[in-house]
Image: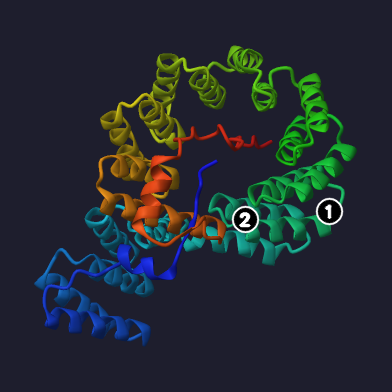
Amino acid sequence: MKPYRSIVGLVLLVIFSIPISCNKTKEEMEIAETLLRENKLDEALTTYTRVIEADNSLVEAYFGRGKVYAELGKLEDAANDFRKAIDLKPNYINAHKKLAETFIKIGAPLDEYQKRVKAIEDNPNNPLTYVDLGVFYHKLEKDIDAIEQYKQALELDPDNPYIMYNLGVGYLDMGLYEDAEEIFTQAIEINPEYDNAHYNCAVALHKQGKIDECMNELNKTLEINPKYSNAYVVFGLIKLRKKKFEEAIAEYNKAMEIEPDNLMARYQRAIVFALQERYDDALAENMKILEKDPKFANAAYNIGVIYHRTDRLDKAMEWYDKVVKKIDPLHEDSYYNRGQIYSAMDDHSKAYSDYITYSMITKWRTGKDPAVVYNEDEIKEMFLHSKPTLEGQMKDQELELKSN
């Protein structure tokens, strides 16, 4: 594990400092922000635009104007401004979050939502209308709203294993593994031949460390559906936990015999190769994954880790940069490992900046500070004595859940 410590509140000023070219520009920015807080949107828009025309390198001006456009419902203009802010400052976490929220709104037109709500209004006793709205929410990663809809559907049809299954997947996505196990078990009691319910129950059990029960559910999954390749991926994870590397590879090979394009099996196999120090094989596997899915962030990250571990730091930096700039700007471990390299190069300012970014993303994801770091010397010491970790080595890789 990495010897993390947390940051003090003061360091938040470092990453989000605003470059001010002159006092007038600073005053204009303060006016614009005040107008936005007071919901005087037209005036705020005019003021932000004036600031940008005076200096088109001000990140916070684009971010602020993007928020105004979003409030006004001008989503395309908002997305453009959030993109511009990110172009100027690639690790601007709030801009990434706002851009994602804007894309969700653009990609989920109000009429699609209203159509589903109207279906419920027209037929409030039909449980499948609630399921349809729940699936809609689920695709938008609004898991709490999705779960609420599935629960309402179950009240109308309490013995429907299909509804139970969807609720279980919602619990899994929320990390509520005991709840997921319970609801999948209920679905299985009603329909013992439900392979997806058995498999996802196994995932919930594995997450809780209930290995014997997990293996039992995996075997039942394969009895019902011998072609269920992801069951072998979980078997491989169990073997990997015990450091039985060759047995883990054998399980991943079984998965790929059934489904040659099972990227999760290939990804896990690459991890085992790296742990065996078969670095060329691991690199080749991860490259094959990226040929199929160029946005597979963890595969790209692990390429960086392999180069990092073998002291090819220029190549490692290239891949960490690729992850955060082109694939996943919120991939916190890439910032952490990049900070290690900066620290080794004695560029402690950039190392510190990357650590702050890592800390902020971690807190955003978990709600907790990862560490308490008081000065740059401590950060330097931490980076120089920690080993870059493969994504999936120290914690289970999330498996993509199959729908029915």
Mark 1 to mark 2: distance in Å? Answer: 21 Å
Element marked by disc 1 = loop
The reply, left or right, for residue 129 in relation to residue 344 is right
Q: What amino acid is at disc 1?
A: Asp
Neighbours of disc 1 within 10 Å: few (<14), some (14-19), many (20+): some
Tell me where residue 179 appears, x and y as whole percent: 78, 50
Tell me where residue 343 appears, x and y as whole percent: 31, 44
Tell me the residue at 81%/43% (across/down).
161
Q: Dot 2 corresponds to which residue?
A: 143
Viewer-proximal residue, 173 or 12?
Answer: 12
Q: In this view, does 100 lie above or below 35?
A: above
Quarter in which the C terminus is drawn? top right
Quarter in which the N terminus is drawn? top right
The reply, left or right, for residue 77 in relation to residue 360 is left
Tell me where residue 79 appears, x and y as whole percent: 32, 60
Tell me where residue 317 appears, x and y as whole percent: 30, 36
The reply, left or right, for residue 287 in relation to residue 194 is left
Q: Dot 1 corresponds to which residue?
A: 157
Viewer-proximal residue, 132 or 216?
Answer: 216
